[in-house]
Image: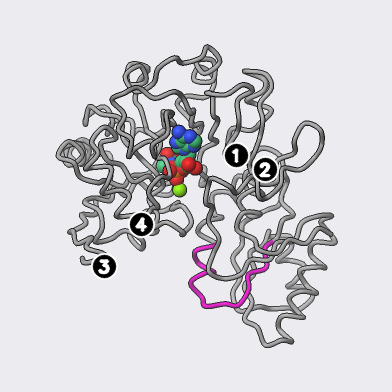
Amino acid sequence: MKAENGNKRETRFFRVSEENFDDILDKAAEIIKRGGTVAFPTETVYGLGADGLDPDAVRKIFKAKERPPGNPLSLLVHSREDLGKVAKNVPEKAFRLMDAFWPGPLTIVLEKSDIVPEITSGNLPSIGLRMPDHRIPLELVKRAGTPLAAPSANLSGKPSPSLAAHVLADLAGRIDVIIDGGGTTIGLESTVIDMTVEPPVVLRLGAVGIDELENVIGKVRPTYMGAEAKDGEAISEKQAGQKYSHYTPDTQVVLVEGERKNVSEKIGTLLENYLLEGKKVGLLLSNETAGFFASEGLSAHGCFLLGPREEPEEAARKLFEGLRTLDAKSLDVILADGSFNPSGLGAALLNRLREAASIRHAV
Ligand code: TXA
Ligand code: MG
C-alpha cells in the first residue's frame, strides 16, 4: 500500500486471536525495538505506538499522523518501574490516582525525566503517562522493553479510531503494523490530568469523571469545554480550546441539548428547515429521538443511531464511528442529539459532541 507525503511503507494487518496472540505480539515487539510503528487497540481508542525514548521512532508517528510538531505525546507504561524511569518528583496524590485508576483510562501528566526526548514531550518539561487496561498494549510494552509513545491512531483532524478499520482507512501505507483486536470497549480517549500544578488541572474528560478524581485527591480544576468551574461559571471555549486541538468533522455539526421533548422537536424543526433550503442532512440520534422522527414521518439523507438515551456507554462506544460514517456521506449538515444521560460516560460523550459542533442550541 502506498501513501502520499513520503510515507511509503507496507502496512501489515494482523487479526489477533487466542492461538496467534504470542506470535503476533512477538513480531510487533520486534518492530517496535527496530524503531517501527504499530497500531493496536486499547480500552479507550486505538493507539499508534513507537519506542517513546527513540526520537527517530517518535518522528515516524508525527509524520504518519501529520500531527503538528509540538503537540505532546503521552507514554503507555506497563509497570511502576517504567514510571520511575520516565517521571521524577512524582507527587503523593499521583500515586493515589494510580492506585485507584490504573490500569485504566487516566493519563497522568508528571515531571519528565531526562531520558524522555523533547520530541516526545513536545518540548514540555512534563509527560503524560498511562497504564492501559488492555492486554495487547501491556504485552507490547513489556515485550518491547520500552514505554510506547502512543497517540490515537488517526490522521490529525480525524476522529479517534474505535475500530481497526478506522486505522486502516487513515494510516494504511504509513505505518508498519495494524493489530486488529476488535472494537474498543470505551470508545472515547482517556481523561488527562496535569499533576504538576496545584490544584491539579483536568485537561480532557474521559471515562474517569471529576467526582471520581475528587474522591481520591480532593479538589481539581477542569478546563475542558463545557466544564463548570467551581463558582458555577462555565469554562470559556477559548480557554478550553487553547492548547489542545479537537476533532471537528468536515461536515458542519449542529448540536441540540436541553429538555428531552424539546430536543426532539427542535431537531425536527431544524431538519425541516434545512431540507427546505435544499441541504443534505444527516442525523446522529438516540433511539428515542429516532423513534419520534419515525412517528412524525420525517427522514434525512443519513441516520446513525447511538443507542438508548439512558445508556451513554453505548453511545460513547459508537460516537466516533457515527461521526466517521456520516462525515463520509458528503452531507451539508449533521444534526446531533444531545439528550443522553449526562452522568458517567455521558459527560465525556457530551463534551466530544460539543467539541465537534460548530453550532449549539440549548432548548
Ligand atoms: O486514551 C488515550 O489517551 C489514547 C490511547 C491510545 O492511549 N491516546 C490518546 O493520545 O488519546 P493523544 O495523543 O491523542 O492524546 C493525549 C493527550 C493530548 O491532548 C495531549 O496534548 C495531552 O494528552 N498531553 C500529553 N502530554 C502532555 C503534557 N506533558 N502536558 C499536557 N498535556 C499533555
Ligand atoms: Mg488524538
Q: Nearer the viewer, residue 126 or 192?
A: 126
Image point (63%, 55%), residue name? 353
Give residue 337's mark. none
In primary-sequence order, the first of circles 2 and 3 is 3
Give the residue at mark 1.
Answer: 205
Residue numbers of the magenta segment: 323-336
Question: How far is mark 3 from mark 1, CA to CA?
Answer: 34 Å
Direction from residue 15 to residue 290 in the image, left or right: right
Find residue 100 and report its image quarter.
top right
Q: Nearest to the eye among marks 2 and 3: give it.
A: 3
Q: Nearer the viewer, residue 171 or 59?
A: 59
**Can residue 129 be seen in this snapshot?**
no
The disc labelled 3 sits on which kind of residue? Glu
Give the residue at mark 4.
Answer: 66
Direction from residue 294 to residue 252 in the image, left or right: left
Image point (60%, 30%), residue name? 201
Give the residue at mark 3.
Answer: 4
**Can residue 247 be seen in this snapshot?**
yes
Q: Nearer the viewer, residue 12 or 147?
A: 147
Question: How far is mark 2 from mark 3, CA to CA?
Answer: 38 Å
Q: Nearest to the eye among marks 2 and 1: give it.
A: 1
Find residue 194 and report its image quarter.
top right
Q: Secondary structure at mark 2?
A: helix
* Label pair 2/1, CB-CB below 8 angstroms: yes
Considering only vertical position in the picture, is 7 above or below 59? Answer: below
